[in-house]
Amino acid sequence: MAKQATVDLYIWEGMNKQGKRAKGELAGSTIALVKADLRRQGITPLKVKKKPKSLFGARKKKITASDISVFSRQLATMMSAGVPLVQAFEIVGKGHENPSMQDLIMDVKNTVEGGSSLAEALAKHPFYFDDLYCSLVHAGEQAGILETLLDKIATYKEKVEAIKGKIKKALFYPAAIMAVSFIITAILLIFVIPQFESMFTSFGGDLPAMTKFVVELSKIFQEWWWAIFGALGGAIYGIMQL
């Protein structure tokens, strides 16, 4: 079996049909093929070179739902243009800015090259491609309308993310008010209430139940403030990741 050519990103400069200088990036196997592709687009290439990799390597980033929707849209566009599936993976993967997403796309591509269907390859990554996604891809493969369903999946995911964004914005203000109120209450319990504790004790007799409760709560906050604020910070971080 012949070894498949590696697709890389190339930086190019050239002249367009209007005689103006243009530049950009284009994926291809070799400089010669990139130049040929540019000429087909009506651009006379003047300079083409492989895009250099970062000296310290690309920093890994989290794969987001937006990355998955963009991947779905790009793959659908490539397939609609007649680009073979494996080559579409190469182009989309090499052109993605997120190194983690590049690794995911290349892993799916390698699985497909090994003889698995696209749905089977995606199902190996359930954290990023849920059952609904894989089922729709499987249906698209069986019906021969994979690019159409990928485009619809991308639209669906974009709408879901838009709704999530609106919900987060709606919850931000009340959550901020609650957080500030909690911090102010904690400061009072940790620093202010202890100043009055000796005064409460000097009154003699039994203190009201509510006063006793506040004093005991103050002692808990003084002893466990680090755990309480740690839990609060963890809760805020968890909500922000939704």
Image (cartoon, rainbow, N blue to C red):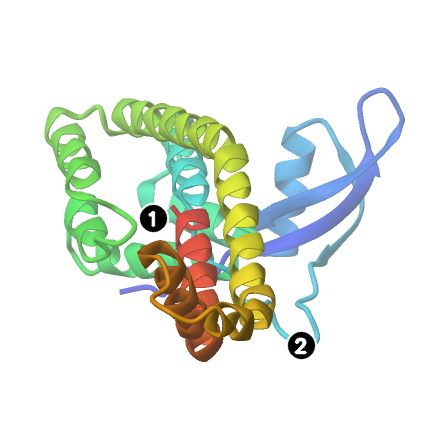
Q: Where is residue 173 in the image (x, y as percent from the top left)?
A: 54, 34
Numbered label attached to residue 86: 1
Camera-side residue of 222 and 9: 222
Numbered label attached to residue 153: none
The residue positioned 73% from the left and 41% from the top of the image is: 24
Dot 1 lies on which element? Answer: helix
- Placement of the N terminus among the 4 image quadrants: bottom left
- The tag earlier along the polypeptide, 2 or 1, is 2
**Label 2 belongs to which residue?**
56
Dot 2 lies on which element? Answer: loop
Circle 1: residue type: Val
Q: Is residue 198 left or right of residue 31?
A: left
Instruction: Examine the rendered structure and indicate whether residue 43 appears above or below residue 106.
Output: above
Which of the 4 image quarters holds residue 45?
Answer: top right
Instruction: Examine the rendered structure and indicate whether residue 208 appears above or below residue 144.
Output: below
**Camera-side mark, 2 or 1:** 2
* Cα gap from disc 2 to disc 1, whole angstroms: 29 Å
Q: Residue furthest right?
A: 20
Characterize the local packing of mark 1: few (<14), some (14-19) or many (20 or more) Cα atoms within 10 angstroms.
some
Characterize the local packing of mark 2: few (<14), some (14-19) or many (20 or more) Cα atoms within 10 angstroms.
few
Circle 2: residue type: Phe
The residue positioned 14% from the left and 50% from the top of the image is: 120
Which of the 4 image quarters holds residue 188?
Answer: bottom right
Asked if labels 1 and 2 touch by Cβ distance under 8 angstroms, the answer is no
The residue positioned 15% from the left and 42% from the top of the image is: 131
Q: Where is residue 23 in the image (x, y as percent from the top left)?
A: 79, 40
